[in-house]
Amino acid sequence: MAAKVIGTVTTYDGREHPYLRGYQVKVLAVFKGAALPDYDPDDGFAVATTDDELARLGGLAPGDRAEVVPWLESESRFSFVSSDPRVEDLAALKPLVAKR
C-alpha cells in the first residue's frame, strides 16, 4: 500500500517560502512536475487531490510541488491561504521522494 500523502500534516523545512519555515502545514494536493525548470503551466499539468490519483500519476517525484495550508495556532484552524512548496521541502514527504 502506498504512503498517505494527501491530508498529511507535516513541517515545512525549505527556504523558498520563508514565512512557512517551521510551521505545520497540511497537504491538499500535488502538482506533478511543477518545480521542474522547464515547467510551463500553460501547457497543461496534472494535479492529484487524492492518494489514488497520485498513485495513478506515478506517485511523488523530485520536481513535484504540493499545495499546502499552514496551521494557525492562535485560531486553532488551518489557513484558507495556500502555498506551493517543493515536496522535498516537506519533512514527511522528503523520505518518500528520496526512495525514487
Image (spheres, helix red, strand yellow):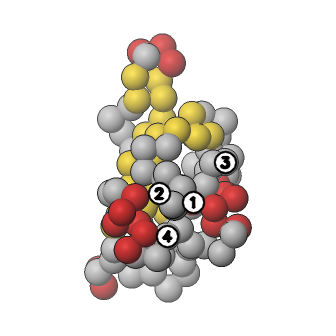
Q: From mark 1 to mark 4, how far is it between C-alphas?
A: 11 Å
Question: How far from the left and from the top, in percent, is residue 51?
Answer: 40, 58
The residue located at (45%, 81%) in the rendering is 39
The residue depicted at 57 percent of the width and 59 percent of the height is: 87
Binning the other alpha carbons within 10 Å of mark 2 as few (below 14), some (14 to 19) or many (20 upward) gives many
Q: Secondary structure at mark 1?
A: helix
Amino acid type indicated by mark 3: Ala
Query: Please, what secondary structure does the residue beneath circle 3 have?
Result: loop
Residue at left offset 58%, top offset 40%: 10
Rendered position, 75 above or below 89: above
Residue under pointer 3: 91
Image disc number at residue 87: 1
Confirm or deny contact between disc 2 and disc 1 (CB under 8 A).
yes
Which label's residue is closer to the chain start, 4 or 3?
Answer: 4
| Upstream in sequence: badge 2 or badge 1 | 2
For marks 2 and 1, give the CA distance. Answer: 6 Å
Q: Contact, CB < 8 Å: mark 3 with mark 2?
A: no
The answer to whether 4 is drawn above or below residue 55 in the figure is: above
Label at residue 59:
4
Residues under labels 1 and 3: Cα distance? 9 Å
Which amino acid, mark 2? Ala
What is the x, y in percent for residue 80? 33, 35
Residue at the spot of label 2: 66
C-alpha span from label 4 to label 2: 12 Å
Discs 4/3, front: 4
To which quarter of the image does residue 95 belong? bottom right
* Residue lying at the far top of the rendered structure: 74
Mark 4 belongs to which amino acid?
Gly
Badge 1 amino acid: Val
Helix, strand or loop at mark 4:
loop
Q: Position of residue 35 (x, y in %)?
A: 52, 71
How far from the left and from the top, in percent, is residue 94? 66, 58
